[in-house]
Image (cartoon, rainbow, N blue to C red):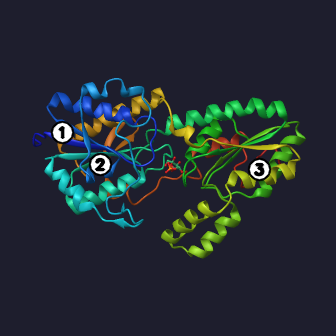
């Protein structure tokens, strides 16, 4: 029989997304009837380090199911690298651990993406804190779960944007390049591109050949398709860039990651490079729409509301049952405790044989590496 718990901390960390409040609501509604106090730390791990929190109860969380963002606010701060006034960083892990024990917490539930999983894992290893996490991000790149919460809403927003771009592209006989978030993964661009019927979808997992993209659009034009939609993930890069990174990194994963990050910050946005080239090659006017933070705003979809409620309830149940050091992972209809030791060592990128990739190719979508079948010749 697990020990009776009396107090649990909750925090939201990393990029926000619709659904965070729905998880907070589910956790609180599940724990309050069990006489468990819920401490909501503000601004991610910063709140835990600075002992800033609000007490969460049914009154505080009622009506949150459909409210975007997070009532606790968030930050990207890491306990072991907290920003200091002089522009440096300081390890404040000790303060986090001290406050956790001072408040008499039995567990800490962290809602976040890959970075948050790592921060929670570090607090567990270095401070023996009982952590439970839920996988949050519109990028859908957290390993150990079928889908992260926030992804469905982000994909719905991006899909609706592509739907709207279709009508204006066809009215003007234009090429519309739509820049979609996703950090270093292509799930959001691939999902929205497929759902929105984009003619080209470029993702980081499949380095693109500018010439192939141009020739695909020309092939469409030969068949009378005088407008095109190009969905491009913000982390997409060309074959040449991929080759340079591979050569410079020489197989060192850490160096490859650093080079990709540097590339993302130094080069012109991939959407701009594409637009310039495609206008030149096709002779069609080309315009860029960057969806940016629209993909992280507003009301969560019904799917995400369901997902968030399940994630939150399961995280609370794990706390009640003394199941710690885990992330709640959705596997089919089950929500399982996935060891954080496993989660933090992997990223979940789009497999090249994923059904979404195969379907995109089957419906003659150009993925940047070859001219779609049916357009060849
Ligand atoms: O991780 C979610 C995300 O929206 C990414 O898709 C994007 O690259 C990043 O956050 C933007 O970070 P910030 O909100 O710090 O600008």
Which of disc 2 and disc 1 is earlier in sequence?
Answer: 2
**Label tally:** 3
Q: CA distance from mark 1 to mark 2?
A: 23 Å
- Residue designated by label 3: 275
- Residue designated by label 1: 320
Whether ligand 1 has any atom under 8 Å from the Cβ at mark 2 is answered as no
Q: Nearer the viewer, residue 266 or 208?
A: 266
Q: Position of residue 196 (x, y in %)?
A: 66, 34
Residue at image point 14% right, 32% down: 35
Residue 47 is marked as 2
Question: Can the viewer see residue 377?
Answer: no
Q: CA distance from mark 3 to mark 2?
A: 43 Å
288 relative position to 295: left or right: right
- The residue carrying pointer 3 sits among few (fewer than 14), some (14 to 19) or many (20 or more) residues within 10 Å by Cα, namely many
Residue at image point 30% right, 31% down: 26
Q: CA distance from mark 1 to mark 3?
A: 53 Å
Dividing the picture into quadrants, the one containing residue 175 is top right
Question: Can the viewer see residue 223?
Answer: yes
Which of disc 2 and disc 3 is earlier in sequence?
Answer: 2
- The residue carrying pointer 2 sits among few (fewer than 14), some (14 to 19) or many (20 or more) residues within 10 Å by Cα, namely many
């Amino acid at each position: 029989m697990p020990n009776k718990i009396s107090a649990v901390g909750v925090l939201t960390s990393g990029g926000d997304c619709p659904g965070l409040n729905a998880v907070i609501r589910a956790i609180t509604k599940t724990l309050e009837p069990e006489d468990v106090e819920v401490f909501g730390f503000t601004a991610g791990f910063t709140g835990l380090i600075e002992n800033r929190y609000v007490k969460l109860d049914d009154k505080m969380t009622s009506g949150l199911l459909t409210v975007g963002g997070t009532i606790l606010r968030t930050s990207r701060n890491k306990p072991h690298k907290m920003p200091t006034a002089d522009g440096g960083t300081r390890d404040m892990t000790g303060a986090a651990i001290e406050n956790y024990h001072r408040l008499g917490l039995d567990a800490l539930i962290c809602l976040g993406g890959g970075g948050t999983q790592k921060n929670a894992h570090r607090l567990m290893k270095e401070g023996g804190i009982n952590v439970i996490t839920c996988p949050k991000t519109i990028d859908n790149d957290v390993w150990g779960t079928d889908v992260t919460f926030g992804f469905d809403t982000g994909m719905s927003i991006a899909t609706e944007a592509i739907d709207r771009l279709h009508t204006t592209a066809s009215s003007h006989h234009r090429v519309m390049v739509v820049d979609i978030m996703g950090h270093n993964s292509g799930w959001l661009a691939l999902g929205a591109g497929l759902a929105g019927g984009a003619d080209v979808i470029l993702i980081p997992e499949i380095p693109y050949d500018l010439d192939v993209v141009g020739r695909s659009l020309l092939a469409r034009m030969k068949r009378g398709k005088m407008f095109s939609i190009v969905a491009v993930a913000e982390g997409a890069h060309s074959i040449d860039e991929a080759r340079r990174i591979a050569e410079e990194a020489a197989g060192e994963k850490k160096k490859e990651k650093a080079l990709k990050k540097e590339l993302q910050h130094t080069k012109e946005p991939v959407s701009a490079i594409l637009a310039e080239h495609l206008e030149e090659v096709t002779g069609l006017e080309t315009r860029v729409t960057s969806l940016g933070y629209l993909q992280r705003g507003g009301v969560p979809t019904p799917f995400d509301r369901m997902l968030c409620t399940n994630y939150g309830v399961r995280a609370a149940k794990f706390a009640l049952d003394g199941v710690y050091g885990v992330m709640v992972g959705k596997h089919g209809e089950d929500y399982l405790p996935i060891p954080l030791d496993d989660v933090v060592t992997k990223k979940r990128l789009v497999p090249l044989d994923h059904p979404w990739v195969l379907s995109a190719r089957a419906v003659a979508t150009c993925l940047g590496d070859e001219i779609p079948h049916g357009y060849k010749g």
